[in-house]
Amino acid sequence: MNIVRGILMRRETGIALMILLLCLAVGLYKPQFLTMNQLRVIMLLVPLVMIVAMGQMLVLVARHVDLSVGSMLGLSAMLTGMMFRDLPQIPWGVGFIVAIGTGALLGLANGALVTIFKLPAIIVTLGTLNLYRGLTFIVSDARQVDRQFVPSAVKAMSQTSPIFGIPWIIFMALGVVLATYWFTLHTRVGRQIFALGSNPSAAALRGVKVNQITLLVFSISGALSGLAGIMYASRWGFVNPSNTGAGFEFQVIAAVVIGGVSINGGVGTVPGVMLGVLLLGCVAAALPLLGIPGTAQGAIYGAIILIALLIDRSVRQQGIASLKWMRA
Amino acid sequence: MQEVTPARPLWHVILVRPETMTFVLLIAAVVVASQLSPYFLDISYILRSFTLSAEFAIVALVLTMVIIAGEIDLSPAANMALSACLFAWAQASGIPMPVAIGIGLLAGLAMGALNAFMVIALQLPSIIVTIGTLTLFRGLAQIIAGDKSIRVPDWFIGIDKILVFGIPMPVVIFVLAAFVLGLILAGTIFGRQIYQVGTNEVAARYAGIRTRRIKLVLFLLMGLVAAVAGMMTASRLGSVRYDLGLGGELQMVLMAMLGGTYIFGGRGTILGTFLAAWLLVVVSTGMTVANLLPAIQLTVLGVLLIVAIIATNFIYSRTQR
């Protein structure tokens, strides 16, 4: 009985039920929603959000927030795309190193501002959100990197498949998810992130190197945004300075908070975030079938964030003491 | 025992404060800008440039009070868009103008109330709540307006063309708003209580201050003022689109931060934000005159935000005790 009860009480079960209900409801109304083709649509929508959401989860667990993910994605994608364009003889694998490295450096800069100057992450990343977006325009001279410059091997990752017709980028997203799962549950540093987010002063007294962990989570968030950047180039085949990753932060934050990551830090699971991303993907895929215009997406993300906050609060009230978030 | 530090000399109190930094930067910006273009010595040119950011500046004044009270609101730019869209949609579908304006204002108030409800009644952190409502409001505006722009009647257009003693109307409204809010913040019991709430909310509550009511008033004021600003923008642009004021939250937060408002609450002045608004206008107009791309201007604003908050924190850490 206790095991059943334990499963039912889990946050992940709730999200899984929501996904199931959503799919059933939409499927009853529009049977074509429950086809393999539709599954493919959803599966191609989610990998980018999935990867960035894993980084955002770590940042939120450490009691910070990263608003600059979309701009880091854009700048990494742009630099990688320009390298492909200007140095065509370079092997395409180097693109991954450039994209991930750029992202990690940008994330490290966020983390350095937060730790060295003791600034709230929200303001720092609101600044770098605009700063990095502006840099994307500057380095690219406001020009798009067109389809013919992205190596076909990179574009193929979104189309060709090693097995079962599932494209490579989904396996890459899955790899990131598994790695994050292992990292958060089975490494010392991973656990220290949770300790830090639950109670920063206690964590510091217990010997957790607060500054290093903070730098680390921001760098990971940046590196994963960079990885998503080259995957963006793979998925869409071009990199545009104004569109690439713009507004991405809201999708990612919506997915992460609906996935049960507490905004007060210290709480969050990889399966929960994964389900949160899938839920968002299902919603995005269901909209056109239901005849709801794509313009409604923004409002839905906003509503999801608020609903997730309400759920978060009702869960928190069941015993976990509320913590003051910004002044900690 | 902690050592008693001697009281700071008067010059120190007056000079070492963020507003002084803002003022010095403002003078420096004007000097540099006037080297770029002689137009900057023409006051009417600066006034005309100011009308482009006047709406954000007005909202930034209220945002300053919200930040001093220890909260933050990132949603006002989206609020401006949604209330302006509702207003424009209402009058375009034949509802009489005064009613349409009423709808816009009420919508703004309702959005402020939603933020207040989530933050005060449900005790959720304002930072995440307003990221959520920012997305929600902008999304609703997009649903209402779609990709089209809604025109407003001809007589409603052109608030920035109305001159009062040669000063454009939006600037007059901004100066008046700064004066009134400055008086409230610095000279009334309510104003002082805002500082107390932001300095230490628990202590303020024990001291008998109705902290929730103060925050409620501030969030409602924020919603109302954002709606007014939205309609002023509609009047200036002549039509309303869902992306009205897009990204305005950066400029608003930047004005408050450049003016020396302490991000953790309890410190800051309307005077600082007032000066910072002018500083920002001179800087961005200067960049436009110098033919910098809008994207580069975005970069500069991002850097300014980070530098401003570092400098402000530094000054406060020097003067705290």
Image (cartoon, coloured by chain):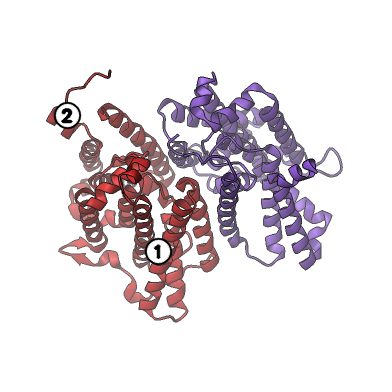
Instruction: Give how far apart the Cα atoms at labels 2 and 1 are.
Output: 42 Å
Q: Quadrant of the C terminus of chain B?
A: top left
Q: Which chain is red?
A: B
Q: Is residue B176 visible?
A: yes
Please give the residue where the numbered disc 2 appears in the rendered image: B12
* Chain containing the residue with disc 2: B
Callout 2 and callout 1 share a chain: yes
Q: Can you give x and y, in whole percent of width and height, for residue A165 in the image?
A: 84, 44
Give the mark, 2 or 1, whose residue is nearer the N terminus: 2
Give yes or no for contact between labels 2 and 1 (Cβ–Cβ under 8 Å): no
Quarter of the view holding residue A72: top right
Left or right: where does residue B118 sit relative to residue B27? right
* Chain containing the residue with disc 1: B
Left or right: where does residue B253 sit relative to residue A210? left
* Most foreground residue, A10 or A220: A10
Instruction: Give the number of marks.
Output: 2
Q: Residue furthest left?
A: B10
Q: Quadrant of the N terminus of chain B?
A: top left
Residue drawn at (50%, 22%), measured in percent from left and top?
A: A204
Q: Secondary structure at mark 1?
A: helix
Left or right: where does residue B118 sit relative to residue B38? right
Q: Secondary structure at mark 2?
A: helix
Q: Is residue B280 above or below residue B163?
A: above
Q: Is residue A89 visible?
A: no
Please give the residue where the numbered disc 1 appears in the rendered image: B109
Q: Can you give x and y, in whole percent of width and height, for residue B19 in the image?
A: 23, 39
Residue drawn at (55%, 55%), measured in percent from left and top?
A: A302
Q: Can you give x and y, in whole percent of width and height, for residue A167 in the image?
A: 78, 42
In the image, what residue type sits under mark 1? Answer: Leu
Q: Can you give x and y, in whole percent of width and height, for residue B233 in the image?
A: 36, 62
Q: Which chain is purple?
A: A
